[in-house]
Image (cartoon, helix red, strand yellow):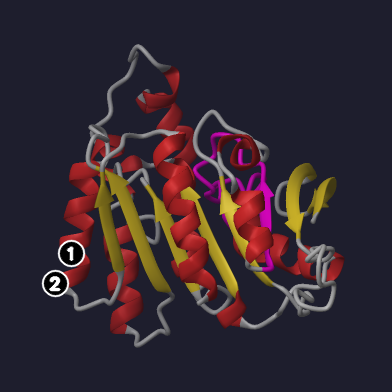
Amino acid sequence: MAIVRVELFSESLLRKVPITCIIPIDKNNYFDLEKDEVKLPLKSLYLLHGGFGSDLDWLSGTRIERYATEHHLAVIMPAGENSFYLDSKSGVRNYGKFIGSELVQLTRKMFPLSSKREDTFIGGLSMGGYGALINGLKYNDTFGKIALLSPALMQDSVINSKYNTKHPIFDRKYYEEIYSNLDEIKGSELDYYALIKSKKNENSDLPDLYVCCGRDDEVFIDENRKYHNFLKELDILHEYYESAGGHDWDFWDIHIKKIVNWLVK
């Protein structure tokens, strides 16, 4: 198991960006070296952290290294800052393009990753769950599966946000930096309701979806249930799970293990 942390230059972001990668090319069964040979090229999961986090979060908060090793799954974890993984109006900070296109191309050059859609996945928690959903749908020709852990489905909260709140990341001024005109979110490609509906109406090949949220997650459980019901109404096949737990690493560790099993089955 190789853990690789590198800086690469991103044309989408116009700067160097750190990424942490789990590349299971050296996994062996110590008692039978031929039994567990790694098959190349590797399937890959582009795994996004949440707000206030970094590219190291998944390694420190879960046993993703063990789960990836067991299933010969490469995991690419980029630093997304607090960007919600979206493109900026200015074109200077295009996190969506970086995550959905550039990073995939660069890592396929760096590591022995499969270029097949059915072997390429995207996922994330909280803010990263929102970013995985939007970019997984936008770049549906690249990603075959999308995994969402307690995704920050907070569109109405963003649109109705106020100025001068107690926390700056939940302030309307901050959201205006991320989304520009908040009144234009509804019906746009940043609207996860409108985006998946338009993809379905276009007969696009939708990625498989896995959504999970803790029943004690007071912030996002209601919106996740709402989105689950919306997907059912559209007759969009998806996996949806609720279980005990909150917006925390205990919940995410349990479910990232289940998600890895789902990705590679």
* Residue ID at (34%, 41%): 182
Q: Would you name the residue on which mark 1 appears?
A: 230
Q: Image check: 129 left or right of 1?
A: left
Q: Are marks 2 and 1 in contact (CB under 8 Å)?
A: yes
Where residue 139 appears, x then y in whole percent? Answer: 53, 70
Task: State which quadrant residue 188 falls in.
Answer: bottom left
Which residue type does callout 2 highlight? Glu
Please, what secondary structure does the residue beneath circle 1 have?
helix
Bounds of the magenta segment: 72-97
137 sits to left or right of 88: left
Q: Position of residue 2 (x, y in %)?
A: 82, 54
Above or below: residue 60 compared with residue 241: above
What residue type is disc 1 on? Answer: Phe
Give me the disc on residue 233: 2
Q: Position of residue 156 (x, y in %)?
A: 23, 41
The residue drawn where x is 44% and y is 75% is 207
Work out how far the residue at label 2 is from the one at label 1, CA to CA, in angstroms.
Answer: 5 Å
Residue 196, x across and y down, in percent: 33, 69
Camera-side residue: 77 or 186? Answer: 77
Q: Is residue 97 visible?
A: no
Q: Secondary structure at mark 2?
A: helix
The residue positioned farthest toward the front in the image shown? 31
Of residues 38 and 133, the one nearer the viewer is 38
Q: Is residue 49 left or right of residue 187?
A: right
Which of 102 and 7 lies nearest the eye of the viewer? Answer: 7
Q: Quadrant of residue 152?
A: top left
